[in-house]
Image (cartoon, rainbow, N blue to C red):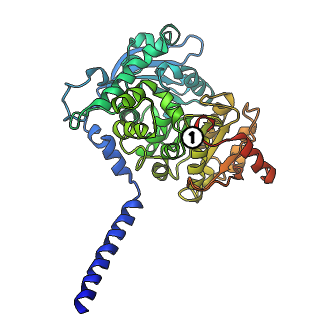
Amino acid sequence: MFRINIALFFILLKMNIFVTVARKKATHALTRPEFQTMLNISLAKALPLNIVEHSRWEDKETKLKWTSLSMDTLVTRRPVGDESEVPSQRRLPMLLVQPKHNEDMAVPVVIFVHGTAKGKSDAKTIMTRYALDYGAAGISFDVRYHGARGVITMEEEIEGSYLNEMARAKREGPYFQAIIDNWRSKPGEQTERPFIFDTVLDATRVLDFIESRSDLFDISRIGMTGVSLGGTITWFTAAADERIAVAVPLIGFQWFAWGRDNDAFHGRVRSLERPFQVAAKDLGKAYVDRNSYVSFLEKVAPGLLHEYDAPATLPLISPRPFLIISGEHDPRCPLYGVASVFLHALDTVYTHAKHKLALYIGRGIGHDIDDTMWGAADAWFIRFLFNPRANDTGVDDLRFLLKNTPIPNSDIAALRRPPNAEHTKIVFQYLSTFPELHPDDSSEKDARSKIKRGGEEL
């Protein structure tokens, strides 16, 4: 009996140790150094910037000063200095605008990131407006295999004429092929991660450039925004690098695992249709099902469905100001998933800074943006980047800005639902940073009728 009790004791002890380790592993919080190591940010800091100025001009109408420049970036997982891999991606083309009336003083700066099949010139209009209206400098750059890093010349990209003259499929070609090559790479051969991660690394190099020119830029006031893919890059860069003071991702923030678990990943598949189809075919599938979707993402963006997803990265951004802008019917960034993880963060990692986290929902909008959504972004940057010394109460100031920005419909609501797919009850909670609306049973019933579960309705 004594021997049996001893054996039982050690069995229970072993089980307890296993459960404890498993629990610790399951609840392990992602740290910024871990995230930076995964992105190779620490390795990139060992490289010189090697800035090259290609051209400089002044806009005759606005009198703004523009500069086209490029710099070195880290594009491979090979040792520093090895240039044998994808030399076309070793230079990072950038476009800089400086407000003329503030050219002799350090000013706030906003980094703008374009979406799929576009380029850095896509941001020229918003960069011009921010420079003229708010006295902010602006920097845009070409995402991996886009713009001047894709199938066009730097001159064509800056002019923006290619957007009309060149078919979207041709512009997407180099980017999609790089992702396919990444998918088909063998263990030990994988040198690139062109989908999201490598461009986040590029964005941190842009931050290195900004930091090196403290004579031009107020490095304590660096903002970042982007649309679609650019919004995703904005979100991950803010998580990876604390130098981003204020971030506003537009239609680019989502909970990837929620889409997987709720059959709401089809919109994301269509955003990368050819790479996903190639992956499904390689796996012997007739179409992109859940398993092939998961296998593809785990290869081209390891950790995106787990340790680097929205619930893990939002704590790295807190308590910095972070505005999520989503379309009500966006199939690529399902609203249920977005709202769930947002509201969970509001009650946890942002509990002492709730006015610095907000969700703006574009009513009736799919995967697109309208003037009201840009108006919300403007208000957020005015409040937290361009006028940070204002009274830090947040709520009244931001509501005032929204009311005085051309936003026809600013009565925006957030759907509160626990971040657990098993819970189905929808509870309405209206954000305190927007005009008050009082939730009741009819509001919840209306929400149920408007937003359906599953597939593209999300």
Where residue 388 sits, quadrant-wise, is top right
Which quadrant is home to the N terminus? bottom left
Res. 241 in view: no
Mark 1, residue position: 385
Q: Residue 146's x, y, as percent?
A: 41, 21
The image quarter containing residue 369 is top right
Task: Pinpoint residue 211: horizontal percent, then vertical percent.
Answer: 39, 37
Q: Nearest the camera: 455 or 329?
A: 455
Horizontal side, residue 366 vs residue 43: left or right? right
Are there few (<14), some (14-19), or many (20+) residues within 10 Å of tag 1? many
In the picture as drawn, the residue positioned furthest to the bottom comes out as 2
Residue in front for this viewpoint, 430 or 424: 424
Q: Quadrant of the C terminus?
A: top right
Q: Which of 97 and 246 is in front in this view?
A: 246
Describe residue 53's horizontal placement relative to residue 449 as left or right. left
Residue in the picture at 26% in, 31% down: 185
How many marks are shown on the rendered structure? 1
In the depicted structure, whether residue 35 falls above or below residue 152:
below
Q: Say which of 183 and 86 sits in front.
A: 183
The answer to whether 82 appears left or right of 110 in the picture is left
* Amino acid type at mark 1: Leu
Does 223 appear above or below 435? Answer: above
Locate residue 327, reporting x and y percent.
Answer: 63, 35
Q: Is mark 1 on a helix, strand or loop?
A: helix
- Residue 206, percent across and down? 39, 32
* Residue at 59% in and 41% down: 454
Name of the residue lying farthest toward the top: 165
Q: Residue 60: in sight, yes or no?
A: yes
Q: Residue at x 57, y 40 (%)?
A: 385
Residue at left 58%, top 29%? 135
Q: Is residue 262 left or right of residue 27?
A: right
